[in-house]
Amino acid sequence: DIQMTQSPSSLSASVGDRVTITCRASQGIRNDLAWYQQKPGKAPKRLIYAASSLQSGVPSRFSGSGSGAEFSLTISSLQPEDFATYYCLQYSTTPLTFGGGTKVEIK
Amino acid sequence: QLQLQESGPGLVKPSETLSLTCTVSGGSTNSRNYYWGWIRQPPGKGLEWLANIYYSGATYYNPSLKSRLTVSMDTSKNQFSLKLSSVAAADTALYFCARITASVASGIDYWGQGALVTVSS
């Protein structure tokens, strides 16, 4: 199985801050990585796929980068509605595996 | 707009079988472009992929649960189902059904709202 190590597990930030979350795969996954945002009690929402492609309708302050085994999600200017938990997902091979999640909280 | 809706009992007794069905609307399960899958999330914890099924009937299971999992599909009803046998308290979770892209891989693009299943006597 491919292990996805996501960091940090939580962070506190202020509105307007630039935030970066990383995911490291235990082996190369090309660019077969997606990022999701989840709010309590809701289904995850896809933000990024193919490591850097922005999902239609998602604000441009979200961006993804990386390939191979190192990936990152950046929020360029944190907005109030961005406080949530973020997950990466590798879909290069089954079993599909998620990172452990990053909870973004208000400072 | 594609929609997925989970249905099934919200309470299951230990050692029994958990059964959920996902009904798809606004799209067809009989498509070579997608897999249909199940993901779960225990309360306060992260996401765990359980299984996928393809329109052909091909199935893919998480090895950690494979011995207890069965997924099936009824394309005539535009539904797919999950069965998890011999459940225990650790199987208490929010269970999501989802669509996973196949022809041009891009991960999970649509999710159901989730069904909370509690394992308790």
Image: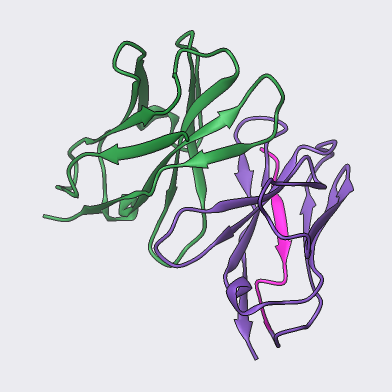
Chain colours: A purple, B green
- Magenta segment, which residues? A1-12
Magenta span includes A9: yes
User: How many numbered discs sit on the rendered protein?
Assistant: 0
- Image coordinates of residue A36 in percent, x first then y, are 62, 54
Looking at the image, which residue is at 52% across and 53% down? A44
Q: Nearer the viewer, residue B65 or A59?
A: A59
Q: Nearer the viewer, residue B40 or A34?
A: A34
Q: Quadrant of residue A32?
A: top right
Looking at the image, which residue is at 61% across and 60% down? A100
Magenta span includes B9: no
The image shows residue B24, relative to residue A56, as above or below, that is above
Q: Residue furthest left?
A: B121
- Image coordinates of residue B75 in percent, x first then y, are 36, 13
Looking at the image, which residue is at 65% across and 91% down? A107
- Image coordinates of residue B30 in percent, x first then y, are 46, 12
Q: Nearer the viewer, residue A2 or B101?
A: B101
Q: Quadrant of the N terminus of chain A?
A: top right
